[in-house]
Image: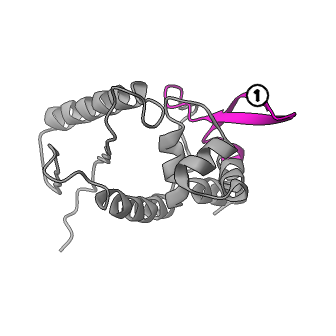
Amino acid sequence: MTEDEVKELRAVAHPVRLRILSLLTGTAMSAAEVARELHLTHANASYHLRILLESGAIVEAGEERIRGGVAKRYRYPHEDPGQPRSRITTESRIAEVRALGRELERRMTQRKPKSPNHFSDLDGWVPPEVWERVRELLMEASGLMHDHNQPPRTPGTVHVSATSWTFEMTKKARS
């Protein structure tokens, strides 16, 4: 694995950074704001933001003057993902899945009891046209959620968790 691949892998394969990416979807925030929202130290938030910025996962979104200083603001550009990530490897995806698993465990502890929800899992065989339609629907749903994500606790919003990961498997069945 090259140095760039390791940097990219480390950037997203961490539960705190996954939370930061979600937080910066739909709004720009400074390190201090991220720290307050996620109950981190300012130094810790700055460190994670720097890692995400260096990997290209987030972008700078301006600066603001605060008490005589300048605070950079960052956002996750979900609407413009840039070039396809050609360096993605199975190893890096597995690390992302592990981080996502830890993040989903945290989210489940905050699930509102008896609220409407949906869970689905399938390792199966479907016609290609069904597979393509499912992918389109999930991409549409993901885009809708990301496009309408608001800053935390915005009046008229509900706090939600939405995760999907769908992919075509190899043709050989594993026992």
Question: Which residue appears at 49% of the width and 59% of the height?
Answer: 15
For residue 21, side relative to residue 1 (left or right): left
Which residue bears the numbered disc 1?
Answer: 64
Q: Is residue 62 magenta?
A: yes
Pick out the residue farthest to the front.
Answer: 67
137 and 31: which is toward the camera? 31
Q: Between residues 167 and 153, which one lies in front from this camera angle?
A: 153
Instruction: Give residue 143's quadrant in the image.
Output: top left
- Of residues 147 and 3, the one nearer the viewer is 147
Q: Is residue 21 above or below residue 150?
A: below
Residue with the most extreme right position:
68
Q: Residue 52: in sight, yes or no?
A: yes
Secondary structure at numbered mark 1: strand
On whether residue 3 falls in the magenta region, the answer is no
Residue at the extreme bottom of the image, as rendered: 175
Query: 147 or 152, which is in the foreground?
Result: 152
Residue stretch rendered in magenta on the structure: 53-80
Asked if residue 29 is positioned above or below residue 37 in the image, the reply reads above
Measured as percent of width and height from the top left, residue 72 is found at 75, 35
Q: How many marks?
A: 1
Q: How is the image coloured?
A: one colour
Q: Residues within 10 Å of mark 1 (few under 14, many from 20)?
A: few
Visible residue check, residue 13: no
Quadrant in which the N terminus is drawn? bottom right
The disc labelled 1 sits on which kind of residue?
Glu
Quarter in which the C terminus is drawn: bottom left
Find residue 18 and report its horizontal and vertical position in percent: 50, 51
Residue at horizontal 71 percent and vertical 55 percent from the top: 47
> In this picture, is 73 found above or below 117?
above
Left-right relation of 97 to 45: left
Q: Position of residue 53 (x, y in %)?
A: 69, 43
